[in-house]
Image: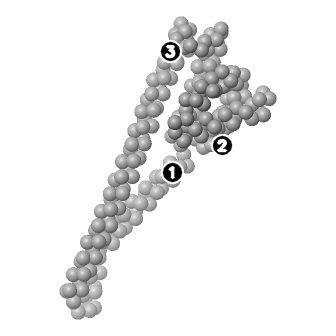
């Protein structure tokens, strides 16, 4: 959340700087009028000043282009996060259907003997996926993530799930740096004495 506020602050500050530069360019002819009133006009010199404005204009165009590129990058990232969230929502709906109908649980290859254990495994999986989505989108800080994982992995259901499926998750989620960090954090939390002692 803090990073999102920083991003917004940087964007607002950049917009204010660009607006300030544009205002200075727009009011500069008034400064030239004052200059003419005080000193005699040297048109050749003023033409050099005009050429300088061409350079300023190029700089403003470059700043606008940078703003467009940054905006597009943010939109691409948001679009990717939206696709991931849509996929996870569909997955959640499928798991929810299986949790409500024990017959559908038979579609999972890693069934245990107990319907209750299967439903708990599915629920813990959803909790971990939710934490991972928050982590991937920078909506949760590391301390809060570790606290949530500690609460989850201290339970019997959480410990059993991680012992049974942790190695699978660690093998799956290692294609991006942020996912690798998440896997390392959950593995570290699962090995803490507080979790082991519970």
What residue do we see at 75% from left, 31% from top?
195
Do the residues bearing badges 1 and 3 touch, measured as CB atoms within 8 Å? no
Horizontal side of 153 relative to 42 (left or right) equals: right
Q: Secondary structure at mark 1?
A: helix
Q: In x, y percent, where is residue 23?
A: 32, 69
Q: CA distance from mark 1 to mark 3?
A: 37 Å
Residue 169 relative to residue 40: left or right = right
Say which element carries label 3. helix
Report the residue at 52% width, 39% height from top: 176
Q: CA distance from mark 2 to mark 3?
A: 33 Å
Relative vertical location of residue 25 with respect to residue 176 in this rendering, above or below: below
Residue 32 percent across, percent down from the top left: 26, 82
- Residue 97's mark? 3
Q: Are marks 2 and 3 in contact (CB under 8 Å)?
A: no
Locate residue 185, reporting x and y percent: 64, 38
Q: Check the image and report above or below for 64 versus 54.
A: above
Q: Is residue 136 visible?
A: no
- Crowding around mark 2 (Cα neighbors within 10 Å: few <14, some 14 to 19, many 20+) is few
Which of the labelled discs sits on residue 79, or is there none? none
Q: Pointer 2: what residue?
A: 143
């Amino acid at each position: 959340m803090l990073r999102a506020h920083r991003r917004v602050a940087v964007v607002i500050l950049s917009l204010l700087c660009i607006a300030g530069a544009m205002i200075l360019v727009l009011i500069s002819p008034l400064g030239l009028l004052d200059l003419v009133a005080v000193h005699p006009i040297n048109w050749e010199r003023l033409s050099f000043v005009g050429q300088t404005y061409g350079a300023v204009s190029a700089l403003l165009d470059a700043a606008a282009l940078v703003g467009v590129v940054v905006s597009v990058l943010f939109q691409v990232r948001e679009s990717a996060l939206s696709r991931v969230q849509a996929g996870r929502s569909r997955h959640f709906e499928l798991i929810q259907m299986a949790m409500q109908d024990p017959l559908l649980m038979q579609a999972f290859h890693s069934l245990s003997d107990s319907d209750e254990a299967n439903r708990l495994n599915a629920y813990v999986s959803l909790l971990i996926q939710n934490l991972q989505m928050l982590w991937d989108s920078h909506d949760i800080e590391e301390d809060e993530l570790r606290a949530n994982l500690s609460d989850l992995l201290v339970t019997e259901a959480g410990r059993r799930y991680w012992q049974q499926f942790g190695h699978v998750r660690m093998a799956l989620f290692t294609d991006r740096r942020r996912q690798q960090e998440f896997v390392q954090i959950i593995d570290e939390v699962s090995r803490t004495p507080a979790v082991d002692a519970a």
